[in-house]
Image (cartoon, rainbow, N blue to C red):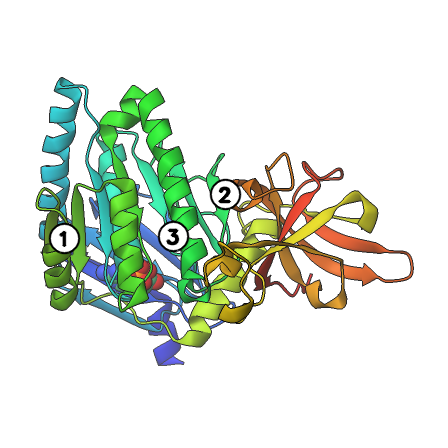
Amino acid sequence: MGEDKKSLLQEYKLDQDNELRFEVESKGEKVYLTLKNGMAEIFGTEVVKGKTYEFTSGAKVAVYTWQGCTIEVKGKTDVIYTAKETPMVLYSNCHAALEIARTESEKENKRGPITMTVGPSDVGKSTLTRILLNYAVRMGRRPIYVDLDVGQGCISIPGTVGALVVERPASLDEGFSQEAPLVYNFGHKNVDANTKLYNMIVDQLAVTVKERLEVNKKTRHSGVFINTCGWIKGEGYKSILNSGKAFEVDVILVLDQERLYNELVRDMPNYVKIVFLQKSGGVVERSKHVRSEARDQRIRDYFYGTIKNQLYPHSFDVKWSEIKIFKIGAPPLPDSCLPHGMKPKDHLTKLVSLTPNPGILHHLLAVSFAEKEDDDVILSHVAGFVCVSNLDMDRQTITLLSPQPKPLPNNILVLSEIQFMDSH
Ligand code: ADP
């Protein structure tokens, strides 16, 4: 009882350059945080004094203070401690250097810095990207945020890569506002499922992002931040090189891995600045199970929204004859059977028409923006996603869960390997 009471309300006094770290693990648990005095930020977003913030299970949080502060925490945390050692000063130096580059680009009407964050899984890549985006936007910049992490990315749902213009700091519960993101469907949660397709989509996203930089001066001078996946070996490393080349990056921030840093120094052109940064001791490693839960949660949020911002998806039937479903990638042919001019890996990016069958049940389908059913489908960005919740073989209809009411914005749908079990 005494222990429980203690965990209910606690006050923490932080000195300058300290960080209060905590995790909420138990299901259904809620933890409330209030800044009583001083100033603090959570991953670059300012904490408003006197306002109470709520954190639910799965939250892994760091409240950092440059000046010192007092924080009140109410509720049961699983881990909570104050850290005196953090890499925040280094991260802030990166921000300062990028800000100098942005001011220069403004003077010369050039493109602002294109920065890519790389490193293995669970080193704080997404967190660093978020901090630097927040610092930029708090200075009045309007940078583009690109997320190439198909497993644990923060734009749209898993299995996609995307970009959005950041106009205001990330909200503490919902991250960056997802109004009109540019999203491409990859359809797998790991890059190694189809590296050729991944690189093609990243190239296409880079072209579109560069076009956006051309048309908006403010964004052009603000630059781009690119978050990547944690697959850094073999083909994964080659994908990182490909992404760097496609986006014409100026700066690569390497978290935690000296070997990766040295490889990039060796393989990237000299004018690309490669910076090695320590990971924060607070970054929490996530098990396979936690990652998989986080993916499910992102899809659930996509359809149903969050506790604060609930959404009400629609469910409707569509006749098979009204839609066209495609899958990207055909089974490989033996080399001896390859048609003339076809390369052994070409099957990986082949568009294959599918007749609805029980195999697509619970799968997500990307609603393509493609106008015609040709190769454009692979490189078209998507309007959104629907989920196949039922299939009627006799009536030849499928039931779809969709964020929007009928009709679908397009009848060209692309199968994703990713499934969602709707428990509502
Ligand atoms: P990566 O992108 O490299 O896989 P993330 O940035 O997603 O890593 O970080 C992994 C987890 O660690 C996230 O849940 C994040 O909220 C948490 N985290 C990051 N930095 C800190 C910190 N300083 N203190 C506490 N938790 C942190």
- Residue neighbourhood size for the residue with mark 1, other residues' Cα within 10 Å, grouped as few (<14), some (14–19), many (≥20): many
Residue 306 x/y as whole percent: 54, 51
Tell me which image quadrant ligand 1 sits in: bottom left
Which residue type does callout 2 highlight?
A: Leu
Q: Quadrant of the C terminus?
A: bottom right
| Residue 15 in view of the camera | no
Q: Which residue is mark 3?
A: 199
Which residue type does callout 3 highlight?
A: Asn
Secondary structure, mark 3, is: helix
Q: Which residue is mark 1?
A: 88
- Residue neighbourhood size for the residue with mark 2, other residues' Cα within 10 Å, grouped as few (<14), some (14–19), many (≥20): many
Q: Which residue is mark 2?
A: 379
The answer to which quarter of the image holds residue 49 is: top left
Residue 251 x/y as whole percent: 16, 45
Circle nearer the N terminus (2, 3): 3
Reply above or below: 61 against 372.
below
Secondary structure, mark 2, is: helix
Residue 415 x/y as whole percent: 62, 56
In this view, the residue in front, 9 or 389, is: 389
Which residue type does callout 1 highlight?
A: Met
What's the mark number on residue 64?
Answer: none
Cα–Cα gap, marks 1 and 2 = 38 Å
Residue with the most extreme right position: 394
